[in-house]
Structure formats: C-alpha cells, structure tokens
Amino acid sequence: MPDLLIELFSEEIPARMQAKAADDLKSRITNGLVEAGLTYAGSAAYATPRRLALRVDTLTDRSPDVKEERKGPRVDAPEKAIEGFLRGAGVARTDLVERDEKKGRVFYAVIDKPGRPAAEIVAEVLEDTIRNFPWPKSMRWGDGTLRWVRPLHSIICVLSAEDGSEIVPLNVDGITSGRSTKGHRFMAPDAFDVIRFDDYEAKLKKAHVILDGRERADAIWHDATNQAFANGLDVVDDAGLLAEVAGLVEWPVVLLGEIGSEFLDLPAEVLQTSMKEHQKFFSVRNPKTGQIERFITVANVETADHGATILAGNQKVLSARLADAKFFWNNDLRVAKGEKMQPWLDALEAVTFHNKLGSVKDKVDRVAALARELAPVVGADADLTEQAARMAKADLASEMVYEFPELQGLMGRYYSDAAGLPSEVGAACQEHYSPLGPSDDVPTAPVSVAVALADKIDTLTGFWAIDEKPTGSKDPFALRRAALGVIRLVLQQHDSVLLHDLFYAHFPRIDRSIVNSRLGPSEAAARGHAPIVIAETRLPDGRVAHQNGPELLSFFHDRLKVYLRDQGIRHDVIDACIAMEGNDDLALLVKRAKALQAFLDTEDGENLVQGFKRANNILSQAEEKDGVEYSFGGDAKFAEDPTEIALFEALEVAESKIVPAMAAQDFGTAMAAMADLRAPVDAFFEAVQVNAESEVLRRNRLNLLSSIRTTCLQVADLTRIEG
C-alpha cells in the first residue's frame, strides 16, 4: 500500500492562516479519499510560510469493486418509464433482471462499478481541493483563473511504495504536478527532487527549512530562554506570539537585543505591547524587578556577522517606536498629575459609545449611578465606588490608549496612581473590564466588583433596550461574554444580587439615554425630559417592571446553564431550579442547583423523584378526570393501611424541616428531609391502591398525593427532572 505526499508551494502565507489551512488541507483530502472508497492508516499536515504539506500513510492502492442494485418500474409499466429508468441507471435493456414482489414483477438494474486506481482518485480530489480551498482571503495572478492566498508555484503529488514512487499526474491552471520543491528562499534556493515523505522532510531540513511548526516553535523557545538565562533574565511567556513568529520563519535564528536605557522607565506593559504589536519581539525581563530590559527577535536567516546587522536595524526601528511611546507616556502623565485626568473625562462626551445609547460620558454617568447602588450589596464604600466608576474609562481619551487600545484599563491604573487617587480607584480602572473570558481572573476587591458589575449590566440593558441582541452565532457586542462576566462576579462574591431589581432600576437610565441620543443632550434638557420608563408595569410586590426585563433575565439563565453544565450540573436540574421563585438571585439559584444535583446523585434522591412523578401523574390524571383540584391535604383519620399512616407522619416531619430550611436557604437540609420521604413513599405505593372503590378513601389518598407534591415542590420543580 503506497504513502501519499502532497506539497503546495507558494509565496508567503500569512502566519495567522497557516494552522487552519493545514487542517483544511488534511480534512478535505482525507475526506475526499474516503468518500471515493480509499482507506488509510494515518495522516498529518504541515505549514511553513511558503508551503502546505500533507502525508497520508498506507493508502489503499485502488478503490473496491462495487455492485449496485437499483430498483426500477414494474415489468408492465409504460415503455417511456422503462426507458427513463435505463437512462438514469446507465444500463441497456438486456442488463435488467426481473424479480417477483408483492405488487408484481419488477425490473432491477444490476450495475457493476469497477474500482479505480488510487492515483486517479488522488488527482481528482487534490484538484478539487486546490480549486475550492477555503482561504479567508485569496488572489488571482497572471492570466489564470485559479485563486490562492498568494501565487502558487508548484505542486508535489507523489505516491511511494517500497518498490519506488510515482508522480500523480495533475495540471491546475498550467501548474503541473511533480516531485520537485525548493528550500530556504535565501540559504538554499535551488530546486531538488523528493521520493517520499521522510526523504522530503530530511532534504528540507538540509535546505534550511523546518517543516513542522511545533518543532520551529520549540526551537525558538529553547534558544530564547537559554539566551535569556545566560544573562540572568526571563522571557515573558506569550503562546500566541510564539505561534505567530513560528509561522513567519522557516529557519528560526534567535537573537537577543537591547533596549535603549532611556526607555527602561516606561511601564513594562507598554514596552511589551509596543514590541509585540509592532515588531513581533518577545519581551525579556529581570526576574528580580519585573522590568523589561531586553528583547528577543527571530530572524529567518543565518548571517556571517551572526545577526549583528539584523539586530542593529531592529534596535533602530524599536527605538523610534519606543520614542513615540515615551512621548505619549510623558504627555499623559502631565494630564494625570496636573489636571487629575479631567480633560479626558470631558473628552468622553465627544466619544460615541453607540449612536442609540449616547456617548461614553453618558455610559459613565449610568455606570456610576448603578455602581453606587451596588456598593452596599458587595461591601464597598458608595462614594469611593462612584468615584472609581467615573474615572474607570478616563484613559480611553489618553494618547497611550489611543495608540495601544489593548492597554485600556491598565493605563487607567497607572494614571490614577499618578493623580494621587485612592488605590481602590486605580484597581477598579484596571479590573472593571474583567473577566473578559472564561479563564480570566475575576476581581475580588469590593469597589472593583461593583464597577465591573455595573459596567456589564449597563452594556446588557442598553443593547437589550435598543434590540441589539445576540442572534445565533453572531454577538458583535460580546453580550454573552458580558453576561458570563456578571455570573462569575456574582458567584465568586456569593452575594445576593437581585438581577430583577437591577434591571428594572437601570432601564429608566437607558431609556433617558435613548431619548437624549435621539434629540441631542441640549435639546433634551431644554425640553425638560425627565427619566422615563417604556412600557412600565407594576408587579404584585410593588416593584417596577420593564418590557425587556424578563427576556434579559432569561438570557442570563441560558448563560448560567452553559456555565453550570461545564461544572457537571445537568440541564434539567438547572431548569428545575430556575422555575422556582427568586431565580434572579444567581448565588441562590446556583446553591439550590448544586444541592439538588447532589440529592439526585443519591439512590434515595433518584427513587424519590420517581415516586414524586408517579404521585404527580396519578394526581394530575384524577384532577383532569374529576374536574377538581385535590390540594387540601389528606386526613390521617381516614387512613386504613399502616403505610398510609406512616406516610402522613413522614410528610409532617419533612414539612417541619423543609419550611425553616428553605427560609434559611439551607438547601442541603431541605434535600435531606425530602430524601427521608423515599422509604415511606415507596412503601405506600407498594401496599396501597390510590383509586380505591371507596370514594372517601380515594379522595383522601389523592389529597395525600397532593401533600407529597406540595412538599417536594417547595424545594425545586421536580416535574422538570427527566427520567
């Protein structure tokens, strides 16, 4: 069985596209081969800046012969129907056979499809893959019609076996397949032939090309950390940058450079960001001080001067970049120290947050008001929290953040500290965007938590009010991420944050911003617009409701389901808890769900749920049949069977434990009390017929089942539990 080697050699492929392109090449080729009837033992794809490569091991040398039977019309069918069947099946009348079936004799076409050689199938699949490759961006060149990410120069397509190898004939827009490729653009530009994959990989390495991207990345990291260690320094870990740089070079040459002393007083994050974004340099820091002192660059060529000229050029360009950063830093410090960032706060009024939700200044005002309300809930000082909320986005108007948006928040902390503001304010500036993702750290300082919650809730309520909600896989404003951030913040704090109240308190502020954005702030003020609430209603408990509140709360519940499922809590368990009162208290909801999950993981819990479902089904059917509701509870004096009496007593004991436990939010105790019902419920159903002949006895037992239902439903809506 032969092995297959494919290489598509082109001009430089952008590093960000290489990994997916290698995966796409592998999946499209292997899927195509399998669909055509070939099998293989294994495969692997590779990418360098100038080539995509694929090896497929132990490929069958031809597809199997296939005999296909196709049912046709009845023998006595009209001639035109039979002729149509012959054309569709591609057979002659003499190739048909007749068979008896229930409805009479029927024609069958027996079609023999001989297998095809692997080379023929490979050529067909590879050409289709090349012509329909899913590049994010592609181009045409010359007079051809082929599109590729960059001009495609050559194609290797070789089937090799122990007795030799053969080129698979293929021609794509004048590019003919062969066995020739080239090595490093500068260090080994001459073409050479290959026979099979191991020969190909070895010859590439001799020609200064490391084919495997992981091997290039490992070589870069090994050399970089060794050079840094030799100078008593550490390389700042950056997996994303390492993967990108490994995609920029075919023969990595690691060089350790110096940063001008005049730039070493810049914040470490500024140095790191500037070098990474503009130059693709790794930062090298002093482990004792944490300060960035040097950099690592990766060249794609070995030079006679061991990289001295390359380093000199890189250092010159870097100095120019860092001079800009130092200029921004010094200017920003003057604003922070001298004017307490006030010019930046004023400038936020001219920065649009969203054309329907007003400026960033409008958002800051809303967040400050909400953060002040949240402060006592999370144990923060209200005045300090409001101050932090008002300063949190000031750095958006700074020169440094304008140049490096990814430093927003972090620079706010530096500038807040420079302005002499309380440390809690600086921490909130840096942390209020967090958590940004599932692995991001969650703020714990009360002021930071309050501002982070307020910022995310304002974003969610705002976009809900203007009907800019996530749809399908589209979420341009990262609202799912914001909701997950709120969930993680609340659950880490274990605070009783009532989303219902927060939404309905904050929607009027959003509505005011919508009016202002429509009229303009000055016109709105001139008309005397006060805060308004759209479609306001009053709930039974006196709270104000807003039309968007229930839907937004449901969105949170959906995100909570995803979050808890990742922690092993079943979706039906979450649904059973969401159905209960107080489901806008996330901490309470999760506490209940975890207790219910633990309860259901026990034998008593699982069996009691089955007993509850049996009781509920019998009761529901009887209520529908009789047209009455059995909800008054049974009377023990009408009980006849000992198990019936025991169940009355068990329900009374359970009720005495469950009610105070639920009032104290002690779900563990409530679940344990409910578990104690398992044995008496089981015994009752084994010994007693509910629908007894005596109508008095039947009604009493149905009311007893109602007591089971009522008692259990106090803990969670067990009707939603599956199974």
Image (cartoon, rainbow, N blue to C red):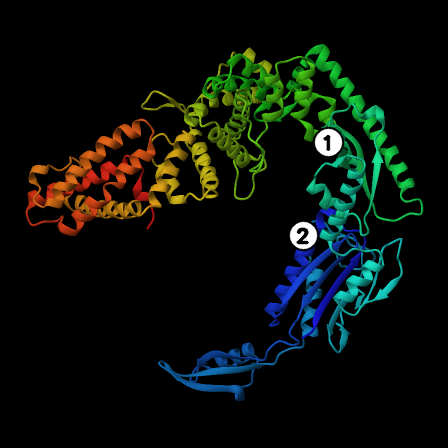
Q: Residue 190's quadrant in the figure? A: bottom right
Residue 10 image position (x, y, % from top left): 80, 56
Query: Can you say whether 190 is above or below 359 in the image?
Result: below
The residue located at (56%, 19%) in the rendering is 516
Q: Which residue is mark 2?
A: 20
Residue 141 in view: yes
What's the amino acid at mark 1? Pro
Q: Using the numbered discs, state the Cα–Cα distance from disc 2 to disc 1 in whole angstroms.
A: 36 Å
For the residues bearing labels 2 and 1, Cβ distance under 8 angstroms: no
Residue 471 image position (x, y, % from top left): 52, 41
554 relative to 32 in the view: left or right: left
Query: Can you say whether 341 is above or below 612 in the image?
Result: above
Residue 599 image position (x, y, % from top left): 33, 42
What's the amino acid at mark 2? Lys
Which label number is shown at residue 287? 1
216 relative to 432 in the view: left or right: right
Work out whether residue 281 or residue 180 is closer to the camera in this orientation and state it. 281
